[in-house]
Image: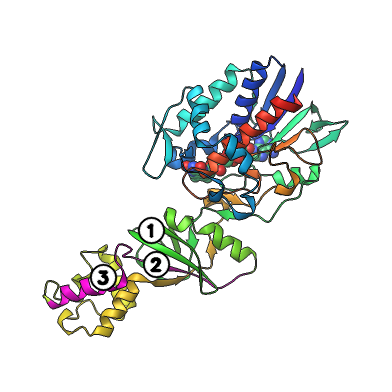
Amino acid sequence: MRQMAILGGGAAGLCCACETAFLAAQKNRPLQISVFEALPRVGKKLLATGNGRCNLTNLHASPADYNENARAFVVPALTRFGPQSTLDFFARLGLFTHADAAGRVYPLSNQAAGVLDALRLEAARLGVKLRTDTSIETIQTKSGAFILNKTERFDLLVLACGGKAAVKTYNAESLLRQLGVPMTKTAPSLVKLTTPSPLPKQLAGIRAAANLRLLLNGRPAAQETGELQFADGVLSGICAMNLSPVLNRFLSGGGTEAAVEIDFVPSMTAEQLKETLGGLCRTGQRETCEHLLSGLLPKQVGLALLKAAGLSPSASTASLTGSQLSALCCACKSLSLPVNGTRGYADAQVMLGGASLDAFRPETLEAKSLPGLFCIGELLDVDGLCGGFNLQWAFASARLCASAVAEGAL
Ligand SMILES: Cc1cc2nc3c(=O)[nH]c(=O)nc-3n(C[C@H](O)[C@H](O)[C@H](O)COP(=O)(O)OP(=O)(O)OC[C@H]3O[C@@H](n4cnc5c(N)ncnc54)[C@H](O)[C@@H]3O)c2cc1C
């Protein structure tokens, strides 16, 4: 019987195992699939996704949601196995889902464990061997076959090792080197931004709705709206984390001058805000500056913005000049904080960079130089923003690989 090894029992590896075994059974082609997982259990990261709820895809996912250099590469996978196809796949496995207004899809149970169970049970049903506690350290190629850890021989090999984010098991750089597959530069992504500004410490624990603009060399490079969270030396929340890939690509390319400009009142233009605050001052509805922003913002944020505008909380609103009001509006609409990097891989959700896309065929994900070798999921140089796009890629690439194996290499 032909032997297929999948390195990595994560989202991509398990999905690939289930789909390949399903297609092989449909075609009546004998194939033994073994999934190697370094950890004692498969799917550990999957359990942590979406804060334990697993945002498994996004209904609106398209190539534009991935890193620029990957957008053409992901087209075949997303065309054949787009978000609806992911939902159909999981429904076939008995897992049902719901979506929120932003298109983020979660299991009906709202438990990531349900997604992992669906994959584990299907793998077991189809006779996939799950080899946990087994880290693959060496790969040799011999007469068209792959020899793992110098002992076991396989006809087909799928690399589904994921990235460095939130794991300690990563050794894919060494494996790719052994196979002669180049890697692009890597960096953490979907991770908190770090800043030397003392403001996040003063506002530690506070959450505020905001629009964030990332300025690189003084020019706008990306923007996100959402709930901004503060902690000592860091900006977090999905809107901040979604700026991290752009920031880290800039910094790893040698850039240095980066800042985040925060609009704390995105629902109003600067003119509307000035008019609103001016009205509150004129009518005497807010007598001191301390209370001027309290109807718009969390109190601590309001106090920090007064300070940034050089205003004392006890100052009378009746005596505010036009330029003082403008300075306050400016602080509310475009408070600029320098950012000098991000937290590391331990705090990140994904890895930027990975196995070079040039080495693989986008229609099959098979290596151009080594027939029978495939690469899927986050290990490839493909990354998306928060919102289900990374798991969508893991599942789409896994199923494209499975189809290629079933249609050709089996
Ligand atoms: C906290 C957190 C929350 C997230 N939430 C979401 C979300 O809600 N939605 C979303 O779309 N994405 C989310 N992501 C990202 C998403 O989890 C990953 O993009 C996705 O899991 C990648 O799947 P993968 O199978 O390629 O890699 P992984 O899931 O990382 O799996 C790779 C597996 O391979 C194993 N492995 C590695 N090397 C070897 C080796 N040499 N031998 C044997 N085994 C090996 C690893 O131990 C690991 O289990 C989140 C990530 C984190 C960390």
Query: In the rendered view, does 147 fall on the left or right side of 280?
Result: right
Residue at 64 percent across and 31 percent down: it is 133
What is the CA distance from the residue labelled 1 to the residue labelled 2?
9 Å
Compute the Cα span from label 3 to label 1: 22 Å
Q: Is residue 187 visible?
A: no
Mark positioned earlier in the residue sequence (1 or 2): 1
Residue lying at 59% horizontally and 30% vertically, measured from the top left: 15
Q: Badge 3: few (under 14), some or many (20 or more) residues near its Cα, within 10 Å?
A: few
Vertical order, 112 against 26 (above or below): below
Ligand 1's image quarter is: top right
Which mark is in front, 1 or 2?
A: 2
Q: Which residue is at the far top?
A: 28
**Vertical order, 207 against 21 (above or below):** below
Give the Cα distance between marks 3 and 2: 17 Å
Give the residue type that dot 3 points to.
Gln
Label 3 vs 1, first from the N-terminus: 1
**What element does badge 2 sit on?**
strand
Residue on which disc 3 sits? 272
What's drawn in magenta, residue-wise? 255-282
Q: What residue sits right under mark 2 in the picture?
A: 262
- Judge whether residue 231 can be spotted in this image: yes
Query: x%, y% of residue 54?
Result: 46, 37
Look at mark 1 in the image and give the residue it sits on: 228
